């Protein structure tokens, strides 16, 4: 294997695939990145894989001799990221490699100023990324995917024992996509309408495909969010999946992940059919006030009290943390009923939801009683629904 | 005490003085910030103090009633930093305070949107900042101070048991200032010439003052560096000191610190009188190469080998970390002698020194043998001297 590529291409692709390299690998070769030099297509393909999440990326290179090879991800990354702009030659010196103790290879990196020899392992020891040969394929507009992820990822559970709750549940329906996430304390749902995709790519209209559901680990989706963000292309993202795996394809990059097994909660049942009161407030103003009150709530169970004054069309947020102090913030609101007069929330869930609600200037807060589910929606823009349970006030 | 000031003034001054508030206070009141409202001068003065380092700042405020008062630094900071732009009223409600249990006061903060009550303590419980009534006073140009600190602070010892080595030693001499720092492994010295100060401030020329020496804790100097950086004024910084204390005065701000006791090492003796070889290299190029080689040196005692080739006027840096790989970087240099041919350094000391050397494009490396002190100087610009000991190579 011998090839030449630019430092910037190698550096950006290497840091991308390294994100799938485990920090505590279960097998030594998994601490490495797989390099495959393709003479025919004149490109270098890099792969990182932790047996659950895999990222693969390929980019143009002048390939003299093809082959495959693995190098320690961190060391390789640290060297390449510090190399000056310009060409880098990677040569695995096949002749010499044979003289090395079995399984040990040496790759030589040559840049304008220096020469590095890095010890690696043969490509044949690296596990294959899962493939989906037969299964569903849909094409998602990147914007819909980003909106769905931004509005739900924050509500997934970080607790690995919570199984399906550590992922985002994706429903592909005739009328669009639905993303949902819940950690058992709050629920976030984003609906995106089927967007007509332009361009030359072969796109199946979502209307034509069958309805299905899949739960994908948050960790993989955070990487997809990053990859789309860095890509800035409006080309559709292909999503393929079968029984156990999902694969996202973004142009020359692909991400594979295991699916989360198990029945996702029937979250639709949690949403009340109707509400007796609707409060419309300015999102930024409300978030600012909640964040200030949170400073004091932090001293007292993280609970804030919201007083709803329908006569003066005003809501007030307050905390009374006896030992340290108290705070009260008031703001104008459109309030449709005089019930309930008071309701309490966990500030953390309120702040996270308000931050994730797409940049609508106004939001609606719909509620029934001080102890039943409350639903926040942006007024206009992305269709997001955020459900939180109020906290019971001890009077 | 009742006053009104702007959120931005209060916020910036509060975060400044809070840097002197200890995270683990030895007495409860030290976790607080002292507020003194001055009716006569219509200003608010804030103080933070950990009994060693103190920072005081004052700024204009509309003061209705004077007085003093302390508030928990972190809570006060957290609330104020989140308040919207505009006026803030602080009122300690003296009438109500009397009804509170002894020693407990409540201050009310009112902003455009909200009202906060924060429990504090009386100002009389707060220790006095040290004063220097009789002692030396000099006026330092901020640029000279910044250059001196940037070139030496990094070389101080972080180890509190090392006493004087945790500070920067400042010598005021007839022909200028000399800053020095050493942690026992390397030594950094910056000389700044006496700079004529302009402006209306009463400035004693350095030539007129007596020579003296003082060692100041790095922690206090890092704060001075920040304060000067944020200030962007060319007004002189006054430095006052007596037996035990130093005080820096920067306009409306002042910083007090205890001096470090004890004899500072006679570092001048460590500098060789003359050198047999001088190598001139491009600083950025050299630093880049050292940083790349450091990736591999990190795997092997952090030691790099430097080969000096006077025939080809080239130096090469290399590391051979058997288990992981090896690296070699070469670059052009002006070399005046063919001895020594090889010398080894700790990469950490080399990198830190090269980064601190003011942005001269060329540096000189002066040396005698592979085991005697090596001195780095920028060619032009600030007069800095950086001495490191080579590492003995095991052959």
Image: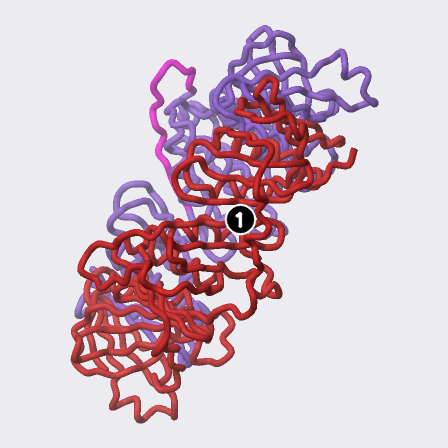
Chain colours: A red, B purple
Q: Quadrant of residue B200?
A: top left
Q: Is residue B129 left or right of residue A224?
A: right
**Residue B9 seen in the figure:** yes
Q: Position of residue A349 (x, y in %)?
A: 58, 44
Q: Position of residue A120 (x, y in %)?
A: 37, 81
What x and y, as percent, mark residue B107?
68, 20
Q: Main secondary structure of the magenta part?
A: loop
Work out whether A230 lies above or below A7. above
* Position of the C terminus of chain B by quadrant: bottom left
Residue at horizontal 62%, vertical 14%? B37
**In magenta stretch: residue A171:** no
Q: Is residue A167 above or below residue B151?
A: below
Q: Bounds of the magenta span?
A: B189-203
Q: Is residue B190 magenta?
A: yes
- Quarter of the image with the N terminus of chain B is top right
Q: Element under label 1? A: loop
Q: Say if residue B276 shows up in the picture.
A: no
Q: Where does label 1 land, which residue?
A: B265
Viewer-nearest residue: B292 or A194 = A194
Side (left or right) of A82 relative to B264: left
Q: Residue at x 56, y 36 (%)?
A: A366
Given the image, what chain letter belongs to the residue carrying mark 1?
B
Q: Is residue B81 above or below residue A141?
A: above
In the foreground, B253 or B268: B253
Q: Residue at x 25, y 57 (%)?
A: A235
Left or right of A124 on screen, residue A50: right
Classify residue B281 by image quadrant. bottom left
């Amino acid at each position: 294997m011998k090839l030449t590529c630019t430092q910037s291409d190698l550096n950006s692709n290497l840091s991308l695939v390294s994100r799938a390299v485990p920090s505590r690998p279960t097998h030594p070769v998994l601490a490495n990145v797989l390099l495959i030099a393709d003479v025919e297509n004149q490109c270098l393909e890099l792969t990182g894989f932790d047996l659950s999440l895999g990222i693969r990326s390929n980019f143009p290179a002048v390939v003299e001799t093809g082959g495959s090879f693995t190098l320690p991800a961190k060391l390789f990354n640290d060297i390449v990221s510090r190399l000056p702009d310009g060409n880098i030659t990677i040569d695995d010196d096949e002749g010499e490699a044979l003289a090395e103790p079995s399984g040990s290879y040496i790759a030589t990196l040559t840049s304008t100023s220096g020469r590095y020899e890095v010890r690696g392992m043969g490509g044949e020891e690296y596990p294959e990324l899962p493939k989906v040969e037969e299964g569903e394929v849909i094409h998602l507009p990147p914007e819909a995917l980003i909106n769905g992820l931004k509005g739900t990822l924050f509500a997934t559970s970080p607790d690995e024992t919570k199984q399906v709750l550590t992922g985002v549940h994706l429903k592909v329906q005739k009328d669009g996509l639905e993303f949902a996430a819940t950690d058992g304390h709050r629920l976030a749902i984003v609906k995106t309408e089927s967007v007509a995709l332009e361009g030359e790519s072969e796109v199946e209209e979502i209307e034509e495909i069958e309805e299905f559901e899949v739960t994908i680990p948050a960790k993989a989706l955070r990487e997809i969010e990053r990859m789309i963000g860095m890509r800035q292309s409006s080309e559709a993202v292909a999503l393929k999946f079968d029984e156990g795996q999902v694969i996202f394809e973004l142009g020359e990059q692909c991400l594979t992940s295991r699916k989360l097994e198990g029945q996702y909660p029937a979250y639709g049942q949690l949403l009340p059919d109707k509400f007796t009161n609707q409060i419309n407030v300015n999102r930024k103003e409300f978030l600012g006030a909640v964040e200030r009150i949170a400073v004091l709530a932090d001293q007292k169970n993280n609970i804030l009290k919201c007083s709803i004054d329908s006569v003066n069309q005003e809501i007030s947020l307050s905390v009374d943390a006896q030992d340290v102090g108290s705070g009260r913030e008031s703001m104008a609101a459109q309030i449709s009923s005089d019930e309930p007069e008071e309701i309490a929330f966990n500030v953390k869930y309120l702040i996270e939801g308000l931050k994730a609600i797409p940049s609508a200037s106004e939001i609606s807060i719909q509620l029934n009683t001080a102890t039943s589910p409350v639903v926040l929606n942006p007024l206009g823009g992305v269709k997001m629904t955020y459900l939180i349970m109020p906290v019971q006030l001890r009077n």
